[in-house]
Structure formats: C-alpha cells, structure tokens
C-alpha cells in the first residue's frame, strides 16, 4: 500500500471510531430517557390505583349509608 492509501485508511478508521462512539452515547441517552419515562409511568399508575381505591371506598361507604 502506498503511504497515501495508508493515511486514507487510518482516517477512515478514525472516523468510524468517532461514529461508533457517538452511537454508543446516543444509545446510552435513549436508555436513560426510557428508564426515566418508565419510572414516571409507574408512579402515575400507582397514583391512579390509589385514587381508584379511594373512590371505591367512598362509593362503598355511600352504599352502606
């Protein structure tokens, strides 16, 4: 291989490394966002279940009266 070809190959490998590193960072950010979103959804489901429980208890107490 000529020196120019070696230099071009090294540049291409360096660019590929940069793109792969960027892809890993992007995947990490998406994973963190999904984890945060799932946590928020879970908290909302817990709050909804508690409100439903309170509503059922209130209806049951009204029926007993």
Image (cartoon, grey):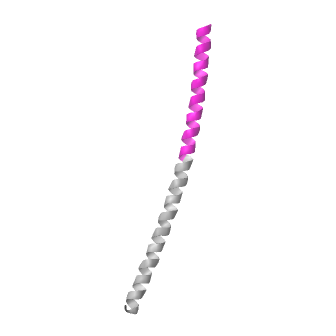
- 31 relative to 2 in the view: left or right: right
Query: Where residue 32 sits: x, y (%)?
Result: 55, 53
Q: How many marks do you count on the picture? A: 0
Determine if the magenta segment contains residue 60. yes
Question: Is residue 1 placed above or below 13 in the rendered structure?
Answer: below
- 22 relative to 43 in the view: left or right: left
Residue 60 location, quadrant: top right
Determine if the magenta segment contains residue 21. no
Quarter of the C terminus within the rendering: top right
Query: Where residue 12 sits: x, y (%)?
Result: 41, 79
The residue sitting at 61% across, 23% down in the picture is 54
Question: Is residue 45 placed above or below 34 in the rendered structure?
Answer: above
The residue sitting at 61% across, 18% down in the picture is 57
Please state the extent of the stretch shown in magenta in the rendering. Answer: 37-65
- 11 relative to 63 in the view: left or right: left
Quarter of the N terminus within the rendering: bottom left
Residue 42 location, quadrant: top right
Question: Is residue 19 placed above or below 47 in the rendered structure?
Answer: below
Question: Is residue 47 placed above or below 7 in the rendered structure?
Answer: above
Query: Where residue 13 sits: x, y (%)?
Result: 44, 78
Query: Where residue 31 sits: x, y (%)?
Result: 52, 54
- 62 relative to 20 in the view: left or right: right
The residue sitting at 57% across, 42% down in the picture is 40
The residue sitting at 50% across, 55% down in the picture is 30
Seen as rendered, the residue at the extreme top is 65
Instruction: Look at the magenta stretch and give its main secondary structure.
Output: helix
Seen as rendered, the residue at the extreme front is 1
Residue 19 location, quadrant: bottom left
């Amino acid at each position: 291989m000529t020196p120019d070809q070696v230099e071009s190959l090294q540049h291409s490998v360096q660019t590929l490394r940069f793109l792969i590193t960027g892809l890993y960072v992007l995947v990490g950010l998406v994973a963190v966002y999904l984890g945060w979103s799932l946590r928020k959804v879970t908290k909302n489901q817990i709050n909804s279940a508690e409100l439903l429980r309170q509503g059922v208890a209130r209806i049951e107490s009204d029926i007993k009266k």
